Amino acid sequence: MATQCGHIYCLDCATFHFSQADPFCAVCRKPQTLDNMVRLYLDDDEECVRGSAGEENQEGGMGSSPVSVMCIERAGEDAAATMKRAIAGREDMQDALLACNTFVNSVTPRERPHINQELLHDIAFQLTLVQTVLKDNDAQVTRLEKEVHAAKAKETQARTQAEEQRRLLRRAEKELTAASKKWDAQREAYELLYQQCIVATEDASRQRVRAAKAENQTEEFAEETKQWRERYTKATKKYYVLKNELKQLKQAAQGRSRHTQPRTTGSDDLEIVQ
């Protein structure tokens, strides 16, 4: 079976692929339906044509339809071009392998001798290049897998370190909270002590004022005591002076009383009448 774009499919592949919704050619991606595909071989009921074809095969070897060979070669060229684009990175490798597989499946023993050998060599060379690319890709995949494993190991290590850092951070936050509470308690204690100091300072100021008043009162009392001592001294001196004068008066009175004999009171002390 051949599509309108010239690509070849076997009957099973064409029936399976183009019977789906929105079918398209697997090689060139052009829209294609199963109804408008071209059958490249005769139906089973055309025995006469098959018989004539058998006679030709006996006379000059196995024959082939030029249209069929042209379509197969076009499919081979498209497969080679697709593989070249895939090797260059401009086409999906899966699509290139699918196009090559379609070409290989479309070649039957009847058309094989009539296919361009250079095209076959080109396709074989492209397949060799594809195999090399796939090996390189496998090596690159292996290297990438190793890098992925190394990256996963580093990620695990980084997660472990991050978890350790989070644990240390939580502990630091707890210590910071405890230190903050302790600081608040110390600040409250300091404020209380400061208030007590203010009260004590005020009490000390009042005590100093009281002490100053007491000192002034003491000085006044000392001055008054001094004055009273001076008065006492004066009074004492005056007392002894008066006593001496009284004694002298008594002596003088005794001298006169010898002649007059006056009556005595029996006391030599001076009677002071206030």
Image (tube, rainbow, N blue to C red):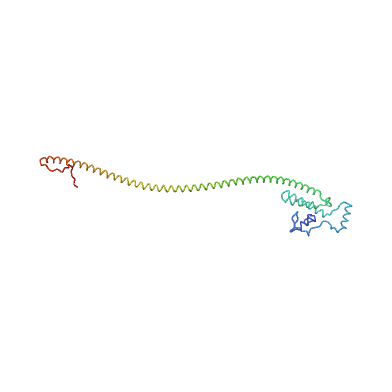
Taking the image as shown, residue 189 lies to the left or right of residue 139, namely left
Residue 139 in the image: state x and y as whole percent.
Answer: 71, 45
Residue 126 in the image: state x and y as whole percent.
Answer: 76, 48
For the N terminus, the image quarter is: bottom right
Taking the image as shown, residue 213 lies to the left or right of residue 112, namely left
Q: Quadrant of residue 249?
A: top left
Residue 115 in the image: state x and y as whole percent.
Answer: 82, 51
Q: Quadrant of residue 153?
A: top right
Residue 163 in the image: state x and y as whole percent.
Answer: 60, 47
Q: Nearer the viewer, residue 236 or 172?
A: 236
Residue at the far left: name it: 259
**Count the marks: how many?**
0
Taking the image as shown, residue 114 lies to the left or right of residue 233, namely right
